[in-house]
Amino acid sequence: MNRLSQIFPLLLLAVLATLTFWLDQAVQQSAQSTENERDDPDFIVDNVVARRLDANGNVKHTLYASKMSHFPRDDSTHLVSPRFVSNASANAPVTITSRTARVSSRGENVYFKDDVRAIRAAYDNRSELMLETSFLHVLPDESIARTDRPVTITDAHTVATAIGLELNSEARTVKFLSHFRGTYHDPARAEKRR
């Protein structure tokens, strides 16, 4: 569980920070003051697929959404069925999905809502790792992701559940807020019993 708490938060927050920066750049426009009074979106894009490349032309991140809407009143961006895939990690891609997401004006807050899943793919001798919750609030500038809702983290050998979670990538910590329960299945130990 110690390795999980060190690696996964760092990968998750790096992906979310990059997503926030990219979305902020994608929706910046010079808006007139009258447009800021509107309650309806100033633009809507269906079937969004956006890729960000590194200096060598390799795909670092891909964002998919069935719909993206920008609201000038608070300069927020709303996504329907977002799926963000980061290939930034040398180890394994990380995918974040939810039913909806909202990115605040300058990207300082990202709110993933409803059926939130963050999955780090399996690599080397490490199994797939999945975080599931109904809401995830990410503060990229502070390297923090948190939820006050039930959360579950699973991999091939571990299941951890809690009410509330705070991930801090700078400190490389995972803090379960309350009602923590965890189980670990040691495959080597099970093999010895046979």
Image (cartoon, rainbow, N blue to C red):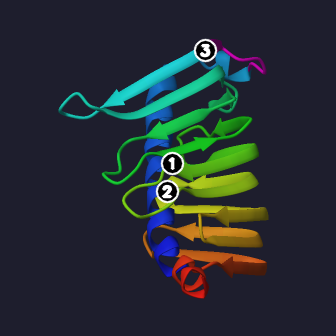
Q: Name above or below for residue 52 compared with residue 15.
A: above
Q: Give x and y (percent) for residue 38.
A: 74, 18
Residue bounds of the magenta highlight: 38-46
Q: How many marks?
A: 3
Q: Which residue is mark 1?
A: 16
Q: Which mark is residue 106?
A: none
Q: Residue at x 19, y 34 (%)?
A: 55
Front residue of this view, candidates 80 and 29: 80
Instruction: Mark 3: give few (<14), some (14-19) or many (20+) Cα within 10 Å.
Output: few
Amino acid tagged 1: Leu
Give the side of residue 175 with respect to residue 108, left or right: right
**Element at badge 1?**
helix
Q: Where residue 13 is drawn, which disc sits there?
A: 2
Task: Determine the CA span between mark 1 and mark 2.
Answer: 5 Å
Question: Is residue 40 covered in magenta?
Answer: yes
- Vertical side of 54 occupied by 64: above or below: above
The tag earlier along the polypeptide, 2 or 3, is 2
Instruction: Identify the residue at horizontal 40%, vertical 55% (top origin).
Output: 123
Q: Secondary structure at mark 2?
A: helix
Which residue is labeled 3 in the image?
47
- Name the foreground residue: 18 vs 88: 88
Residue 131, x across and y down, in percent: 64, 58
* Tag 1 and tag 2, C-beta contact below 8 Å: yes
Which image quadrant: the N terminus? bottom right
Query: Is residue 7 toward the left or the right of residue 185 in the image?
Result: left
Q: Secondary structure at mark 3?
A: strand
Q: Residues within 10 Å of mark 2 (few under 14, many from 20)?
A: many
- What is the x, y in percent for residue 10? 44, 63
